[in-house]
């Protein structure tokens, strides 16, 4: 490995509030499919969560919990 490769850092970009609204879900899916974001935090207590969660299954991102 050369010096440049050793100095590279990985940047994680998270999209917050998945399952809050259809518009947010659509935006997260759009960004994830294009590998613009690396993760999302989900509002698992949202009434939308059960349905919204299904769309995350095949996306190339990590999913975390939105706790506050």
Image (cartoon, rainbow, N blue to C red):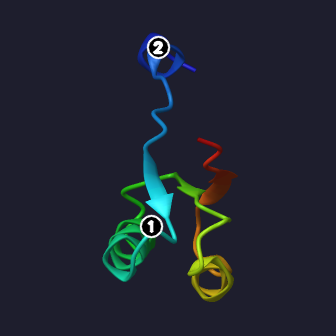
* 35 versus 41 height, above or below: below
Quadrant containing the C terminus is: top right
Give the answer, above or below, for where 35 lies relative to 13.
Answer: below
Mark 2 crowd level (few <14, some 14–19, many ≥20, 10 Å Cα): few
> Which one is in front, 67 or 26?
67
Q: Nearer the viewer, residue 39 or 24?
A: 24
Residue at point 61%, 49% (across, down): 66
On screen, residue 44 versus residue 2, left or right, reads: right
Q: Give the residue drawn at x 68%, y 80%.
A: 57
Do the numbered discs 2 and 1 sit on residues whose CB atoms are within 8 Å?
no
Left or right: 49 in relation to 6: right
Compared with 10, 66 (above or below) is: below
Say the numbered circle drawn on residue 7: 2
Residue 61, image x, y percentages: 59, 61
From the viewer's perspective, is 36 left or right of 64? left
Residue at 42 percent across and 62 percent down: it is 35
Earlier in the chain: of badge 2 and badge 1, it is 2
Quadrant of the rendered image containing residue 4: top left
Return the residue at label 1. 32
* Alpha carbon distance from label 2 to label 1: 26 Å
Q: Quadrant of the N terminus?
A: top right
Check disc 2 and report its element: helix, strand or loop.
helix
Vertical position of residue 1 compared to residue 11: above or below: above
Disc 2 vs disc 1: which is toward the camera?
1
Q: Secondary structure at mark 1?
A: helix
């Amino acid at each position: 490995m050369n010096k440049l490769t050793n100095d590279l850092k990985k940047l994680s970009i998270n999209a917050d509030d998945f399952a809050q609204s259809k518009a947010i879900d659509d935006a997260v899916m759009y960004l994830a499919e294009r590998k613009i974001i690396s993760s999302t935090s989900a509002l698992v207590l949202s009434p939308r969560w059960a349905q919204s969660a299904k769309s995350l299954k095949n996306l190339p991102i990590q999913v975390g919990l939105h706790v506050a």
